Amino acid sequence: MAFDLPMRAKKSFNERWNGGMGAVDGFDLTFINAIIQRDKPKQVVEIGCASGMSTALMSLMLDSIGGGRIDSYDLAQNYYVDPSKKVGYLVDEIAQQSKTVVDIHRGHTAVDVGESWDPARPIDFCFIDASHQHPWPLIDTLCVMPYVRPGGLLAQHDLMMYIDKTNKLAIGPKMLFDQVPQRDLVTFNSLVDPSKVEGLRTRKFAGNMFAIKRPPQLARIGLALSRGFYLPWSVAQPIPEDVLIRVEAILRRHYPKGVVQAFNDGIERYHGMSGLTLKHGYLPPS
Ligand SMILES: C[S@@+](CC[C@H](N)C(=O)[O-])C[C@H]1O[C@@H](n2cnc3c(N)ncnc32)[C@H](O)[C@@H]1O
């Protein structure tokens, strides 16, 4: 399937992109654009904004199908590569004239999405590119998926980072990928032929993205994905207890007990918090 990016988007991207800025490359953008041109989302959520490169480019892609809205969440206030700049600063540089409305939620994460989400306005497409330490991509996915419309995609970045010798903790996207049932998986190669990606700056490898299709019911996919909680966690810093409790509440609200159990078992096994019993946990202390 070939869906070309708008010319303006290509130019803005090529003028600014370099491999050290922690942003999507030309292959990734082609994958995201293929989804946007095919599915025509109106409401997009992004987890992990950083410079705002992906946010700005998605804004131009949405313009090309009539415009839309992007809510982009990032834990930080400032861009981690250059802290003198605000998270999302490139949106003003690249997409100032865009008719797509962009709202950047600095200091917020996927755990916050549901708190303010209007059920009458389901998310059509979600792009997840925040912490790559396991199980963050899994947590982000499970927290946002209830608010995505059935059939909508949740795309994940940096699948290939687990191979990079300098990034031994960034195994989260691969851990998640390995749990996705075939029927819910959208692979990079099913939407993009890397040999046909032209006129965009790229890394040396393609296939760094995949997507999960949100099924009508959450129970089956939730249970399948939550198996990932049983695999070794790679968080450099313990996830704060109040965040764990909020994640657990989201899981409890939207998924079967087995998902909550997997999360609690993962905490006990891998989080250096053996004996911690979450205040609202299903499990009695053992
Ligand atoms: C790889 S960068 C995002 C790059 C951006 N999507 C792009 O392509 O231009 C990852 C961002 O995720 C943010 N981040 C890290 N952990 C997070 C979390 N748990 N929730 C939300 N954002 C997080 C970091 O502050 C950083 O800005």
Image (cartoon, helix red, strand yellow):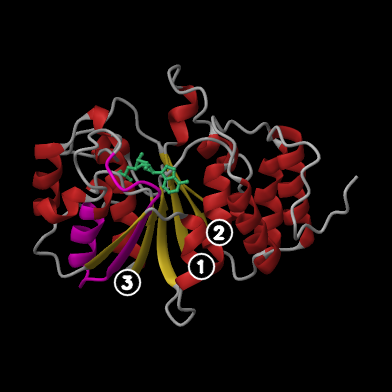
Q: Residues within 10 Å of mark 3 (few under 14, many from 20)?
A: many
Q: Position of residue 193 (x, y in %)?
A: 32, 41
Left or right of residue 114, residue 268 in this image? right
Kind of residue at disc 1: Gly
Identify the residue shown where x is 14% and y is 58%.
Answer: 95
Identify the residue shown where x is 49% and y is 79%.
Answer: 119
Q: Which residue is mark 2?
A: 143
Q: Nearer the viewer, mark 1 or mark 3?
A: 1
Q: Is residue 176 above or below residue 247?
A: above
Q: Quadrant of residue 221?
A: bottom right
Kind of residue at disc 2: Cys
Q: Is residue 88 above or below residue 40?
A: above
Kind of residue at disc 3: Lys
Can I make out residue 148 in this image?
no
Q: Nearer the viewer, mark 2 or mark 3?
A: 2
Can I make out residue 113 in this image?
yes
Look at the numbered disc 2 and say if its residue's Cβ is closer than 8 Å to ligand 1: no
Label 1, label 3: how far apart the Cα atoms are? 18 Å
Q: Which mark is residue 114?
A: 1
Q: Secondary structure at mark 2?
A: helix
Q: Quadrant of residue 228?
A: top right
**Precedes in sequence: disc 1 or disc 3:** 3
Q: In the image, is residue 72 part of the stretch drawn in magenta?
A: yes
Identify the residue shown where x is 46% and y is 73%.
Answer: 117
Left or right of residue 220, residue 98 in this image? left
Are discs 2 and 1 less than 8 Å apart at CB? yes
Q: Is residue 187 above or below residue 259?
A: above
Q: Position of residue 165 (x, y in %)?
A: 45, 17
